[in-house]
Every structure is written in C-alpha cells, then in structure tokens.
Amino acid sequence: MVKITLSILTIVLFITTILMFNIPVVSSDSGEQSQNADENPLTEKCYKCHDKETEYKEWKVSGHAKTLATLRKAELAQDSCLRCHSSSIPSDVPLWGKDWRSRATLKTAQNNVGCSSCHRHGSKRKHYLTRSVKKLCVTCHQMDCGCAGGGIIHQSQAEMFAGKGGNGVKRMPSPHIKEMPMRCVACHMEKETSVEKVVARGGHTFVASMESCQRCHLGEDDISIRVSALVSEVNSLLQQVERMLEDTSAQKDSQVYKDAKLNYDMVKGDSGYGFHNFAYAKALLKYSLSLREELLGNKSQKADSSAK
C-alpha cells in the first residue's frame, strides 16, 4: 500500500512540475515536438494576435521564415547554429547556460527566426527591439559566428559593410555608414509605398531594392546602370579568384592560400557581389589575385608565356 501511494505521489509531482514550469513534452523516439505545440513555451504565440497584420504577412514570405528548415538541411548544422537560425534559443541567453531554454536542439527547436528574435514586449526600446537598430542585424549577419567551424565563413555582411577583417587591404568602411544611421534597416526595410499594405520588397520581407537607393540618389538616372556594372566587375573578379584557388599548387593549409581564400570567402559570403561595399570587395579580390604567382607557381609562368 505504501509503495502504491509513493508511486501515485511521484506521478502527481511529475505532472505538477510540468504544469508549473510549462516544460515541453518531447517524444523520446524521434525528438519531434508534441502535438500540443501551442502549450510549448518555445513556440512563438505572436501570430495569435498579429497574424492579420502587414508585418506578419510580409515576414511569412521572408527568408527568416525558412531559417530552421534551411539549417536542418545543412551538412555542417549543429545545435549552436540555432542562436541565429531560430528564436527557440533567445539571443540574450548564454548558449550553454543554466536557462533550460538554451537546451533546444536541431531536433527539438520549433521556431524559425521569428518575432521574438528582434522584438520583446519587455523592451524599452522603440518598436520593442531587443537591441539597438545599429547592432540588431549584425548580431547574426557576421562572419565570426563560428558555428560552421573554424575558418569557415558563413556570412560576412557586417565585416564587408565596415570594411574590415580581410587580408592585405587597409580598413575601408562603406561610405554609406556615415549616411545611414539606420544601417541595414534603411535599405532592407524601406518600403516601396507608404501605404500599409503587404509588399514584395522592403518591410518585413527584408528584401532590398533599387527603389531604396533612388530615395537618396535623387536625380541620378544612371544609378541602376552603375550598380549593375559594379556587380559584374565583382562577379568577374570572384570567378578569377575561384579558378586560381582551384588550380593552385600550394597546400591548402599554407598561409598564402588561406589569405587568398579568406578574401574570396568574405566577398562570396556577403551574398551581394560587393553590394554592401564595392570598393572593399574589389580590393580584397585584387589582393587575392596578386598572390597568383605564389599560388600557381610554374602554372602561372606557363600561362604568362602562352599569353605572350
């Protein structure tokens, strides 16, 4: 009788603990979330009040709404990547801290980069932002997150915009830094219309457009042509460096190879063909190309001879 009473008491205490702390119940077989997703504190509930709003509808078609699915398909994916690919681990929670929410894994995480990644009701900042406008986007959009592994540049928007971090090139900040106190938001959230309606670019789609450029470059009819020419130039340099790195006779763990590859990866990881800083992108790639003889050795001399 005593054993039965103790067993019942254990069950009651277990259920009470779950209810008190709202602990998510996860299947031990597959690691998938339970069907009671709405009761799980890791599941964002923002949509319950904001699903009819313009911002939510724009976010649903954004890249941020697919980050978790994208991560799970990645070959090098690991739990630490959730800090930027999911709001299941709040960005202000230490990665392996005592807070139980930081124990979300690739299997148990349930959210993409959602509302709470940027907004919290407890925040005293404008729009309830979790960080200042200048720091918010670059918290994740930087190359030194390290989640992909040592020496692997996942993305480099912050460094390219600031014009730093590359090899053989002096610091070269984008001229837009002084002109854009709102930083990333100025281009990536600039709406094509002032009317509150769902748009294909800007807003919470975070897709930049040439319209955002023209708001500042008034009267410059050739801005699109100039940008197109710069993108083509950077793309051409990228292809040249890529071929050089593929043909190199140098060891991939040599310093000269690492220097050239880092610059290439920075421009490539920026995902904009230099758009965030054309001058710096070109300087990085041209420095990589200046290492051609060291990287190609005899191949470089033969190529020069045949060219003559």
Image: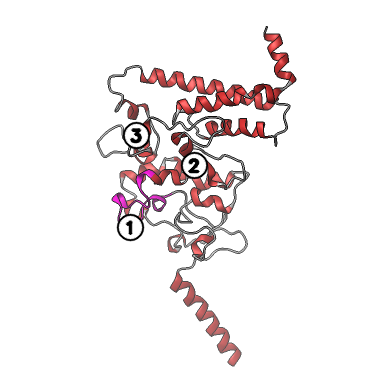
Of labels 1 and 2, earlier in sequence is 1
- Quadrant of the frame with the C terminus: top right
Mark 3–mark 1 Cα distance, whole angstroms, equals: 31 Å
Q: The disc labelled 1 sits on which kind of residue? A: His
Q: How would you rate the neighbour count of disc 1 (Cα within 10 Å): few for under 14, some for 14-19, many for 20 or more? A: few
Is residue 73 or residue 30 the one in the foreground?
73
Depth check, mark 3 against mark 1: the one in front is 3
Mark 1–mark 2 Cα distance, whole angstroms, equals: 26 Å
Asked if residue 307 shows in the view, the reply is yes
Q: Residue at x 70, y 18 (%)?
A: 300
Up the image or down, 102 lies above or below 84; here it is below
Give coordinates of residue 23: x percent, y percent. 49, 68
Q: Secondary structure at mark 3?
A: helix
Residue 131 forms part of the magenta stretch: yes
Q: Secondary structure at mark 1?
A: loop
Residue 90 bears which disc, if any? Answer: none
Of labels 3 and 2, earlier in sequence is 2
Q: Residue at x 57, y 39 (%)?
A: 153
Tag 3 and tag 2, C-beta contact below 8 Å = no
Mark 3–mark 2 Cα distance, whole angstroms, equals: 20 Å
Give coordinates of residue 288: x percent, y percent. 60, 26
Residue 41 forms part of the magenta stretch: no
Q: Quadrant of residue 49?
A: bottom left
Q: The disc labelled 3 sits on which kind of residue? A: Lys
Residue ID for mark 1? 121
Residue ID for mark 3? 178
Q: How would you rate the neighbour count of disc 3 (Cα within 10 Å): few for under 14, some for 14-19, many for 20 or more? A: few
Residue ID for mark 2? 142
Q: Which residues are magenta?
A: 114-134
Give coordinates of residue 181: x percent, y percent. 32, 38
Q: Residue at x 72, y 29 (%)?
A: 250
Q: The disc labelled 2 sits on which kind of residue? A: Gln
